[in-house]
Image (cartoon, grey):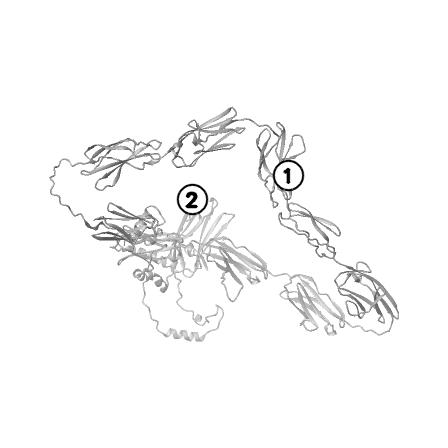
Amino acid sequence: MIFFFPILSGTGNTELTGLFVEKPPDSVVAITGTDVTFVAKVDSSTLTRKPTMKWLKGKWLDLGSKAGKHLQFKETYDRNTKIYTYEMKIIKVVPGDAGGYRCEVTAKDKCDSSTFEISVETAQQEEHEDILSAFKRADAGEDEGDLDFSALLKATKRKKKPVEEKPQIDVWELLKSAHPSEYEKIAFEYGITDLRGMLKRLKKMKAVEPKHSEAFLKRLESCYSVEKGKKIVLTCEVVDPNAQVKWLKNGQEIKPSAKYVMEANGNIRTLTINKTTLADDAAYECVIGEDKCFTEVFVKEPPVTITKLMDDYHVVVGERVEFEIEVSEEGAHVMWFFEEQELHRDAQSTKYRFKKDGKKHTLIIQEATLEDIGMYHAWTNGGHTKGELEVEEKELEVLQDIADLTVRATDQAVFKCEVSDEKVTGKWFKDGVEVLPSNRIKMSHIGRVHRLVIDEVKPEDAGDYTFIPDGYALSLSAKLNFLEIKIDYVPRQDPPKIHLDTTGNMVSQNTIIVVAGNKLRLDVEITGEPAPTVVWSKGDQAITESTGRVRVESRKDLSCFVIEGAERDDEGNYTICVTNPAGEDKAVLFIKIVDVPDPPEQVKCTSVGEDCATITWEKKKGSSRWTKMIEGVLYEMRVFAVNSIGLSQPSLNSKPFMPIAPTSEPTRLVVHDVTDSTCTLKWLAPERIGAGGLDGYVIEYCKEGDTEWVVANKELCERQGFVVRGLPVGEKINFRVVAVNIAGRSPPATLGQPVTIREIMELPKIRLPRELRTKYIRRVGEKINLVIPFQGKPRPVATWYKDGQPVDTKTIGVRNSNVDSILFIRSAERDHSGKYELVLQIENMEDRATIEIRIVEKPGPPIKVRVTDVWGFNAALEWDPPKDNGNCDITGYTIQKADKKTKEWFTVYEHNRRTNCTASDLIMGNEYMFRVYSENLCGLSEDPGLSKDTAVIAKTGLVHNRAPYKEMDTTCVPKFTQPLVDRSVVAGYSTAISCSVRGFPKPKIIWMKNKMIIGGDPKYIMQNNQGVLTLNIRKPSTFDGGKYSCMAVNELGQAEVECVLQIRRKEGYGVEGGEGGKLRELGEWKRGEG
């Protein structure tokens, strides 16, 4: 029973605002065990898109994810009024359904909501008990069943037993004191259906008495809500920033993983749950020692909507029905109903089948019956659709009815009928009694035809016969009449008569055509009294054999002439003669033997093309042109002769041949050059060459106006260019080029206009490349290869000069062609520097181009390096430029200093352009030496210029009375002044570990990983800078983590320090950037230190 807002405990708001046309009432009181339906209507006439409706309980719980047997949602749309109707139905209300509800509708930028309250009351029980109900059988309905006195006796016995009253238990007190992991157990034990609603109220009750925490500054929120598949972050704040926390889920400790990421940043502790599922819907705790804070995570599953609705079906009995729908998510749960009854998969019955294919769900009814008529429903937690099934009975059409029969004794009676459905079976009846098969009575069903055959009919077989199809209210009836004939014997004489059948193999009245190899059986009916004598003959020869290939068989009133495997020799005239005392009859037949033709002869191929060939043959000469052949493939042909009888044997194979075609014409034929007696032509290969390949080209020419073409090349030209020589000066000549292969000549490629044979004078011109128009600089030992293109006709003369003199061809290579000149030096020397000039001459015309080549090398050292002045902590230096500047300008100088004690050189200045400088910040009491390198385009000089004198920085203002010198012992055992420090780094980022050591004599440094000496592995770089030791590790991986140690050893002893290097995987970082990523990095580093 469904109540539509049965009791209103307040006055609802009758004014409709926003999107709602009709809202649920503000307050509804429902009775437990009844059904309640809430209706909301939305006007979509002003909306641009379909509105979205959500039913919520409280502030956050989306009821769409709870759709099922208890909660059902329905959505309909009226096209005329453009109003959407949304319904929420609560099946069999329980006390846990009480609370505040809200329906919320959104459409793009518009939103509206309505709140209402549901109160649940228990049904009032009648004071007196229905005594008859105690006597009803357990399996009986409301109106049936006998009184069960044994049950009454048991009931009375049960009433006599004292009932122990159980003490009232306050579930709220149990939940307050229980652990969150025990909530579900308590709910199951005490029948709590709305555990979440009770936990929500429990949270409000606990909030009244806040408990002070010594470990937490800010506890977890009371509950969190997240959509399925999204990420959620649980955050709390602790008092001690170094406190270690544990995270629990339903009382079980959570281990860090890709799904659960735990981070610590100062006082903040966070637990991130990635890609939440329904399994993450649980109670969570953060524990510090004995102190805890709790929360609950609710995972909302998005409602599954129906994207393709169910269609109606109209079928006949026995047809297959498939109700198909599509839902919004794969793997969704769909419930199927027939009327109000849910359909389930039954192993014992195959009537209903359920099929899932991705988002498609199908209900299959194998063979529909009249009982299946009705409405079928499909429900998801967010949608509903229905379809109607109509089933009609099949109509059977009678194509041929049974006919009445009248037969004589020993004859055969055949009843035959034909119906429209070949699958229909049926039964035969005689006078209302079913006919059963026997040796004399046979029943058959072939396709749509049903037969009843009765052999050797007897008088008792007469009667009414009926055929009744199975499953149809239809019957076909006919009557069998038995005919008795009484004959009085009167002897008589009839002359013989031959009855020839003019149908069948007879093409005319007396001619029979037989295919060679086939069997001829000629049955000739003969009548006459008494029985006549039959004689068969071919020409004058009588045929008397009753066996063999050609024979005569005699039967009652029938003479059979048989030829087994007819041959061409059997052709001729055959005579049949019948005689008896009453007369004679004769007939002449001509038997013609036909056969397949003989095979053709002399099959040969007369011509071929690109994809065709012409074939000819003799013996009834013929020819044919075959197409769609593959070029370059060998073929053999054979021919069959065909007549109306069939195919002949194949002819002998022709000789092998190959379809080949000439190539297409050459492409892009152009004139490259013309002189007074020659013409140079160039072209490209044909676009299509084919299987015949390309043997070469033939070049032909003729004078303008002539039609006779002259071949210019005696042999085939294989290159794609040719110089035609011996042409008359001033004549206009046409040229063409033909490609030749095994199939012959291709179409010619012809120039568009004739060519005048006369050389055109062209001034000489040097095309100097851009990079050679400035000074060309190369280093000593490098290779020089200058290519200078030019133009001019006739061919110009190119000459190279160096500094006005012809170049020496022994050291410098020169090569000239028609279009360019090449200057080549295999190994450049400084002597090759200078100005090179290329002179291009044609008769009295010329063109010149100049190229300046400079060969450079490193400069010599500066000379006369000296200390000119020393004052305070400074020293003034001067020097002279080097004698050899390397054939280019000096770009600067590099000055270095060295203390005479350590003799280690340090750079003071680089790229100093002047020939003097001042060295500052010198140390008092030290004596310094100096050296200077000169620098040019090739780099620093090989050797430096050393200063002959030194700079002594004297101590000023103090008079020191030297005590007797006593040599001090400076030797000491190696000792680390700064140890190695443990580190935690991210894999893939280079890192370094450092320490410092002192000791004399200078100790030897040994780096070790896990007590194994690190050798010359290029992954590690070891440095020692005045006692500061550094080990650089390039892009470490997780395998590079471990214990690293550094050992310093000299002759007095050794010392060792060690540290732990932890390599973190990149997955340790969060997905977000910014401050969140830094917090997680810090958290990982602190865990690494711990």
* Relative height, residue 640 to residue 446 (above, below): above
User: Residue at coordinates 21% horizontally, 50% vertically from top-left?
Assistant: 975
User: In screen coordinates, is 685 left or right of 826?
Assistant: right
Q: Earlier in the sequence, mark 2 or mark 1?
A: 2
Residue 493: percent from the left, percent from the top?
87, 71
Secondary structure under tag 2 reads loop
Q: Tag on residue 808?
A: none
* Relative height, residue 321 to residue 699 (above, below): below
Q: Marks 2 and 1, Cα distance to the nearest angstrom?
A: 75 Å
- Return the residue found at the far top: 844
Query: How many dots with numbers?
Result: 2
User: Residue at coordinates 49% horizontally, 70% vertically from top-left?
Assistant: 144
| Disc number lying in front (2 or 1) | 1
Q: Give the amino acid type for the residue marked by disc 2 in the picture.
A: Asp
Q: Tag on residue 747?
A: 1
Q: Tag on residue 109?
A: 2
